Amino acid sequence: MSTPPNDFAHRLKAAMQAAGYEARPTVLEREFNLRYAGEPMTLHGVRRWLVGETVPSQSKMDVLADWLGVDATFLATGRRALEVRDSSPPWGSDLSADDKDTMAAFLGLKAQQKRIVREVIRAFAKAGKA
């Protein structure tokens, strides 16, 4: 029987495989928790996503979609989102051209690379305050 959690589970497995990951709870738990800033998910919790028992919250869905390189609306519902996006960059106009290029390069990185860059920047910022 087709239910929203079952349908989500199929899309999640397909997205994981398309991104080069095995659709296994241990892989999902590790990769998700590397990227999610909130309370870490348990192995049992992510297993329930993969077997179609539950669907994650929107904030968790957004993290999954970003990690797997898919649209969050599609991952959640199976439908493509129709939206109009602002074509201006998400940072202010007061940045130098070099800073804008750096931000654009950062946004093009994979999620794991972004996490590392964020940690380096935070370490420099913290050291600068000391």
Image (cartoon, rainbow, N blue to C red):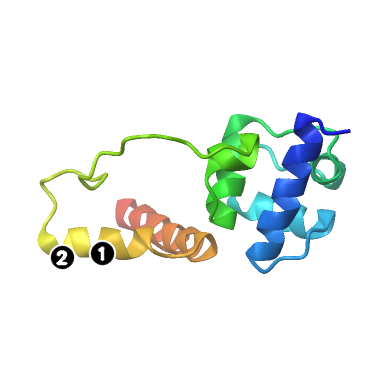
Can residue 6 be seen? yes
Return the mark for residue 98. Answer: 2
In the rendered image of this protein, does residue 30 appear above or below residue 46? Answer: below
C-beta proximity under 8 Å, tags 2 and 1: yes
Q: Determine whether the residue tagged by mark 1 lies in a helix, strand or loop.
A: helix
Please state the horizontal and vertical placement of residue 93, each as a whole percent of the image: 12, 45
Who is closer to the viewer here, 12 or 89? 12
Q: Residue at x 32, y 51 (%)?
A: 129
Question: What is the crowding at mark 2: few (fewer than 14 residues within 10 Å), some, or many (at least 20)?
Answer: few
- Residue type of the residue flagged with mark 2: Asp
In the rendered image of this protein, does residue 78 appear above or below residue 117? Answer: above
Quadrant position of the N terminus in the picture:
top right
Q: Determine whether the residue tagged by mark 2 lies in a helix, strand or loop.
A: helix
Mark-to-mark CA distance, 2 and 1: 6 Å
Who is closer to the viewer here, 30 or 124? 30
Q: Residue at x 82, y 57 (%)?
A: 26
Please state the horizontal and vertical placement of residue 114, each as a whole percent of the image: 46, 60
Question: What is the crowding at mark 1: few (fewer than 14 residues within 10 Å), some, or many (at least 20)?
Answer: few
Residue named by callout 1: 102
- Residue type of the residue flagged with mark 1: Thr
